Image: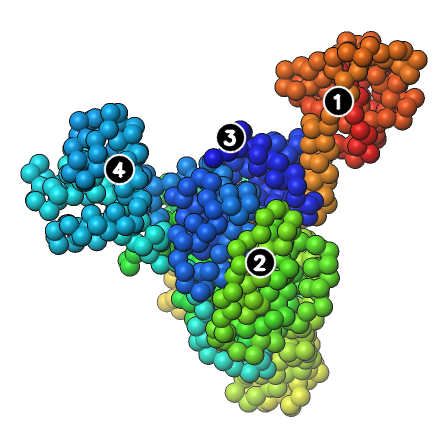
Amino acid sequence: MTTGNPARTLAEELRGRPDTALAELLRARPDLLTPVPGDLTQLATRAGTRASVVRALERLDRFTQQTAQALAIAPDPCPYDVLAGLMGDEPDTVAALPRAVAELRAQALVWGDERRLRLVRTARELLTPQASGSPTGLGPAAGEVAMAMSPGRLQQVLANAGLPTTHDPVSAVESLTALFSDPKRMADLLDQAPPEAVTVLGRLMWGPPYGTVSAQPPSHVRWLLDRGLLLPTAPGSVLLPREVALHLRDGRAHRSVAAVPPEPVAAGTYGMRVVDATAAGQAAVAVETVEELLGQWATASPPVLRAGGLAVRDLKRTATALDVTEPRAAFWVELAYGAGLLASDGESDERYAPTPAYDEWLALPAAQRWAELAAAWLAATRAPGLIGGRDGKGRALSALGEGLDRGAAPEVRRAVLALLAGLPEGTAATPDSVVARLRWQRPPRGGTPAEGEEEDLRTRLARWTLEEAELLGVTGRGALATHGSALLSPPEAGTGEAAAGAGTARDTRAPDAQGRDAGGANAPASGAATAADAADAADRPSPRTRPRVGRPSDNHAAPPPTTGTDAPAPATGATLAARLGTAAAPEHPATPAEARAAALRAAAALAPYLPPPVDHVLLQADLTAIAPGPLKRELADVLGVLAEVESKGGATVYRFTQGSVRRALDAGRSAAELHDFLTAHSRTPVPQPLSYLIDDVARKHGRLRIGAAGAYLRCDDDALLAEIVADRRAAELRLRHLAPTVLVSPTPPDVLLARLRAMGYAPAAESPDGAVLVARAAAHRTPPRTPPAPVPDGPPAPDATLLAAAVRAVRAGDRAATAPLRTSQAAHTPHTPQAPDTPPAPEAPGGLPRTASAETLAVLQAAVLGNAAVWIGYVNADGAASQRVIAPVRVEGGYVTAYDHTADEVRTYPLHRITGAAELADDPS
């Protein structure tokens, strides 16, 4: 076992990695970037903190987690051969193990060469079996438990096991551990065990490793206790030592090893034309539904609850109006909100209404409108499936309310779509097989839930994604459509973890997110991506051309991993790599520019499948009109007022009624205008019944006039007024004669208008000057609003620019921390002689150089004259100290202007904030 600081030893390995490997480490573990580490030692230390290690372990696939768990129970350091023995000798496991070790090394969870693999200390502490067991089903080592036993009891155990007694507990424990670790002696000992004792060991072998015993245990249990094969941990509790369990398991750490991810099960296969046409039809319905929803809310805006969100009664009313279920209505509402088309108006009587962006959205072609919705859905962190449930405090979760953000939602959606993209064209996968694959890629923290238990969040998100993708038209009949595949940015469409997820044989796979080729033949052990890999990936065929689903032939040859951080990882065969995939690779969210480009590609792919807007309808004799496709905006607006929508689909059916015609007249149109409109936009003659309906309603419309008194009702026809007064249904209106042609009522005008229309009359409202009031519903709009910002799960993913800058800063800081200093006096000029035994510049606490002000000034001036780099300590205005390597250019006025190698830019530093300066033995520039 090596000695020294583990973090510094890990830092030395990180120091040998190329910049691309460091960038991939920071991309995979973005929490290491906040703030940017000062040097590689800080990076290694931060990579070993508990919170960071827990997050990194949770993002590993199942097999890589099992490999880490095996390393936690292995000797430290662990040779690769010992690890391979713990994982088993199945061909799939042998072939997959090098990839898992390389992944752990790339994540800075494992360091060392193949002879001395080391799991970082924090990961070992998290994964080491405790008294309650572990994922491996193993308990603590015999030495950890036996040290709590009395010395006399230890000697009795040694004697009963046939071992010589010792003089101290330490040597006794070592002797017992050596017995349990010797397969031959253990086999001889177990051959003497009673059959019942062997049965007890078999029950505890695969875990949990603890059990309970009575004060007077049976003879076979007493036999196990006397020989240390069961060790007491507390009164009435016993534990199977780890070494004994490993012997019983033939040295295997896991009962079953998930080296190969589960294959997606095909639910059906369809032609791509069928899939695209089905998805395009649903995409058109999605656009129409959102448009209908926002059109209704523009004139009848629902209020915002005091606690925020949409009331249940308003959600039910919306579901009824859209003719969908409440969960689907909640999805459409959340979709419009996530796309920035819907928001609260912010008034004192706060209501939800369309935003100005809705008007811009309406002006777009249908395909682009759908792409805007789909892109917003793909990136949103809000999960509509949670609506109707309760949060951790027992509060109900409402649509548009708080508590619906789940940072994992975008990642799960992309993983599901990428998994579908990896299947052969037109193939749909069963939801359970998709969920099983995602659980392998990212195992749930509490394990697979038992039957009847609630599924974990990621599983529910995956199931909701499949439903929502079908509802939105991203998939058709469960298979990913062409325009749905276009939503994924090029690096994700069929590559990485989910594209490999189909498990098909294909040698033309793109590299995964770590930059490793799927074939594995030239994959760097550190998992670094190179520019050549990226260029090669761009030229490779699309995963949509996969020929079949199935497991290819195995390639089990897997040499042990190579030493060094820059050496290539062993080849595992292209066909096997296609089965293994790269589930542990971190997900790289698309940048806004990439997402926008993907949306444009999706719109272009969808456009050919959407029918062009039509400018005509087909009028029928039964007072209906058939729109043979989506109507142009102007025609749809007028027809939506003049008729009622009776049914939707590929062809929308409108029905003309007295109420709908009266609504058009109330909107200010005359009967002649309605006749002209229908004649101009109908491909069939206007039916006589429809003409009669319009003329009849127009003749009655406006004969009765209602104004404000409370309300008055006037009409030139006294007989009509007398008929209304005599009508029993008008009794509650309390109408009375004010003049021969005028009735008055205490009822408000709008109520009186509605009641008389319900009685079958056609009154019209009038203004104080006697003109007919045109009833047009005011379209409510909110002030300009931005779409809700996604709530990420943990630190945001860094972009390439940030990664490059961070790597440069860490390298420069590490160079400053490790650069050798000259052993000459710090304060000198080229004209000042130096003593041969002058000590180096002293350092302040924390490793910063400490020199007097005059000496610091002299070192900086000498560096300017000699064009040399120096090492300085610097304390900023916030009191944060750092060390930097700078190349001074000018020293004057109390400031030094220099090129900062740490920041890779020219900066100016006040001299009074520099703690000291020292020359470097070699110029790092």
Q: In this view, does 341 lie to the left or right of 852?
A: left
Which quarter of the rendering shows the C terminus?
Answer: top right
109 over 378 or under it: above or below: above
Q: In this view, does 206 lie to the left or right of 283?
A: left
User: Which one is in front, 59 or 527?
Assistant: 527
Residue 821: give its label.
1
Q: Which of marks 3 and 1 is nearer the N terminus?
A: 3
Which residue does the numbered mark 2 point to in the structure image? 570
Q: Earlier in the sequence, mark 2 or mark 4?
A: 4
Q: What element carries label 2?
A: loop
Does the residue at mark 1 contact the one at mark 4 (Cβ under 8 Å)?
no
Tell which residue pokes out farthest to the front in this image: 164
730 over 406 or under it: above or below: below
Q: Is residue 838 visible?
A: yes
Residue 3, x across and y down, in percent: 51, 30
Residue 752, x across and y down, in percent: 48, 60
Q: What element carries label 3?
A: loop
13 over 671 or under it: above or below: above
Does the residue at mark 4 contact the one at mark 3 (Cβ under 8 Å)?
no
| Amino acid under disc 2 | Pro
User: Which one is in front, 353 or 100?
Assistant: 100
Q: How far apart are marks 3 and 2 (CA)?
A: 29 Å
User: Which one is in front, 183 or 700?
Assistant: 183
Which residue does the numbered mark 3 point to in the structure image? 3
Instruction: Report the mark closest to the observer, 1 or 4.
Output: 4
Q: How crowded is mark 2: few (under 14 residues within 10 Å), some or many (20 or more)?
A: many
Q: What element carries label 4?
A: helix
Which residue does the numbered mark 4 point to in the structure image? 176
Residue at 58% x, 31% y is 8
